[in-house]
Image (cartoon, rainbow, N blue to C red):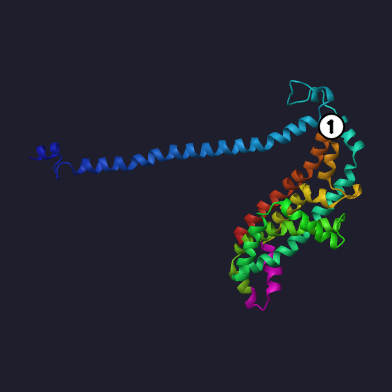
Amino acid sequence: MNTFHGAGGGRYGTAPHGAKGTGRSRSTPRRTAAPRRTATRAAQYAALLGYLAFLAFPFLWLLSTAFKPPRELGSVHPTWIPEAPTLENFRQAFAQQPLPAAAGNSLLAAAVSALFAVLLATPLAYVLARFRGRLARAATGWVVVSQAFPLVLVIIPLFLILKGLHLVDSRTGLITVYVVWSLPFALWMLTGYIRAVPRELEEAAAVDGAGRLRTLISVTAPLLAPGIVATALFAFITAWNEFFFALVLLKSPEKQTLPVVLTHFLGAEGAADLGPLAAAALLATLPSLLLFAVIQRRITGGMLAGAVKG
C-alpha cells in the first residue's frame, strides 16, 4: 500500500517528493531573474552609450573641422583626424570678427541674468514649496504655461514693451529678458530642492526665535547650495547660448553677443567660411563645457553631504 501510494502520488508516500518539487519550482524564477536583470542592465548601458555618442558626435566633428586646412575641408573623403592640423582657422576667426568683445557681452549677460534669476527665484520657490494654496497652484501653472509659448509669439509684444521703456539695443534690456525667461525654470528647479529640505529643521529654528527670512538665509539656503549652483549653471548656459532675443533686440555691433557674431561668418549667399566658423564655434562652446566640468563635482558632493545631514 505504501508503495502503491508512493508510485501513484498518495498523500503519505509523495509528501517529501512534493516538497522537493515545490522547492524546485520556486527556485526556477530566481535563477531566471538574474539573467534578465543582467540583460536589462546591459541594454540600459548600451542605450546610454549610444546617447552619449549621439551627443558627442557634433562636438568631435566640430573639433576636427576647426583644425583642418582648407584643402581637407573641401575634400570629398573627409577624415576624423586632420592630416595636417593648423591654427590658421583660429587666427582668421579673430581677424574677421570681434570675438573677444562678443564673448565679453555674452559673459556679462549670462552671469548677471543667472545671478538675478537665482536671487529672485529662491524666495519665490520657498513660498511655493512651503505655502501651498491657490497662489502656489497659479504660479505653478504659470511656470508650465510659460514654457509652452514659442519665442516667435512673444518677441513682437516684448519688443514693443522694451521700445516703450527705451531698452531696445541695450544690454540692460537683454539681461532683463534673460532673467524673465529663465525665472520659470529656476522656480521649478528650486521648488523641488526646497521640498526636499526637512521641515523639522525650520521648525527648530522657529523655536529658537528665528523668523522666516532668517530661517531661509541661515538654515534653508546652506542646504540648497547644490540646487542654487545647478540652477545658476543652467541659467548661465541658457543665456550664454541664446541667439534669437539677442539677434532681435541688439543692433549695435559692439553690443552683440557671441552667438549673433557667429552668423557673420556666413556669406551673403549663405556660403559659410567653414574653417573660421568651426574655430569660433568651438571657442564659444568650450566655456559651457569647462564650467560644467568644474562645478559638477561640487554639485554631486553637495547633494551627498545634504543627504547625510538630512
Q: Position of residue 266 (x, y in %)?
A: 84, 36
**Residue 274, image x, y percentages:** 82, 31
Image location (x, y in percent) of residue 293: 72, 45
Residue 64 seen in the figure = yes
User: Which span of residues is magenta-colored?
Assistant: 205-223
Q: Is residue 131 visible?
A: no
Assign a secondary structure to mark 1.
loop
Quadrant showing the N terminus: top left
Q: Quadrant of residue 127?
A: bottom right
Q: Is residue 56 left or right of residue 198?
A: right
Q: To which quarter of the image does residue 29 belong?
A: top left
| Amino acid on which disc 1 is placed | Asp
Residue closest to the eye, 229 or 77: 77
Of helix, strand and loop, which mostly describes the magenta segment?
helix
Magenta segment includes 108:
no
* Residue toward you, 229 or 113: 113
Q: Residue at x 83, y 49 (%)?
A: 106
Give the residue furthest to the left.
Answer: 1
Classify mark 1: residues with Cα within 10 Å, few (<14), some (14-19) or many (20+): some
Residue 8 sits above or below residue 106 on the image:
above
Q: Is residue 34 above or below residue 236?
A: above
Q: Is residue 207 magenta?
A: yes
Quarter holding residue 48:
top right
The residue at the point 83 percent across, 58 percent down is: 173
Tell me the quarter of the image containing the C terminus: bottom right
- In percent of the image, x 84 and y 53: which residue is there? 108
- Image coordinates for residue 255, horizontal then vertical, percent: 89, 50
Q: Count the numbered circles shown.
A: 1
The residue beneath circle 1 is 273
Residue located 73% across and 47% down the image: 292
